Image: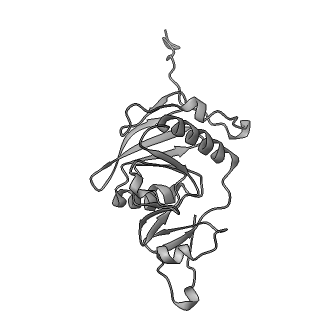
Amino acid sequence: MEGVRLGEAAGKLHYTWDDYRSWDDDARWEILGGEVYAMTPAPAIRHQRVLVTLCSRLEQHFRGRPCDVFAAPTDVRLSDDDVVQPDILVVCDPDRIKPTHIEGAPTLVVEILSPSTAAFDRSRKMALYARSGIKEVWLVTPYPWLVEVFLLDGAGYRLICAYQKEEILSSPTFPDLGITLAEIFDYPIPPEEQVEMVKEGRPPYGSKTD
């Protein structure tokens, strides 16, 4: 994301939900602490594959249960000065679901990281999510494959587990939820992008002097 200051010539540097609602619907923005951030261009295909598949798995799990699953772009108003659009969110309080947006903290938020957003998501957005009382956050790295599960613990988040492609993700908030990550990360990686992953192996026996 790139921080922008709309209306700087007019001396306006702080923006609110009312400002946000008046902007062009064709552009995507987020507000954190009254500062405006322009969303990056359309996400890469790999990002979208992960989003669609993961959202589908979550929707299947929560179907018929008292929680709803939403995908970006869905406006989430955390305060008058904080408006975000997480990649995926799970809302378990029906009173938070309004005709135009989600009002208040979802129970679970998923952010799919990219090189241009990773630092922003890990720092400013995670801090905002903690202040807003979002109970659980997943940070998904499309490659090298990784899902980090964080649980709110006081004023910040505690890393519960980091899952790799071969594992089944479990949620501390929803104990009966299990996601086979091999299905989420089921796409080819170009040879030039592949990295050497650390794997369990067998050490050599003996030595040259034996």
Where 76 sits versus 33, above or below? Answer: above
Front-lying residue, 129 or 24: 24
Percent across and percent down for residue 29 are 57, 68
Using the rendered view, name the quadrant where residue 182 is placed.
Answer: top right
Front-lying residue, 190 or 199: 190
Question: Which quarter of the rendering shows the N terminus?
Answer: bottom right
Where 208 sits versus 76, above or below? Answer: above
Name the residue located 56 percent from the left edge and 42 percent from the top edge: 55
The residue at the far bottom in this view is: 10
Percent across and percent down for residue 104 are 40, 60
Front-lying residue, 54 or 43: 54
Using the rendered view, name the quadrant where residue 162 is placed.
Answer: top left
Q: Report whether residue 63 is seen.
A: yes
Name the residue located 58 percent from the left edge and 39 percent from the top edge: 56
Instruction: Determine whether, in the image, residue 137 is placed left or right of residue 180.
Output: left
Instruction: Determine whether, in the image, residue 163 is placed left or right of residue 192.
Output: left
Name the residue located 51 percent from the left edge and 15 percent from the top edge: 204
The residue at the far top in this view is: 210
Percent across and percent down for residue 113 are 55, 50
The colour scheme used to paint the residues is one colour
Front-lying residue, 18 or 97: 97
Name the residue located 49 percent from the left edge and 82 percent from the top edge: 13
Where 129 sits versus 10, above or below? Answer: above
Instruction: Determine whether, in the image, residue 98 is placed left or right of residue 133.
Output: right
Q: Report whether residue 112 is seen.
A: no
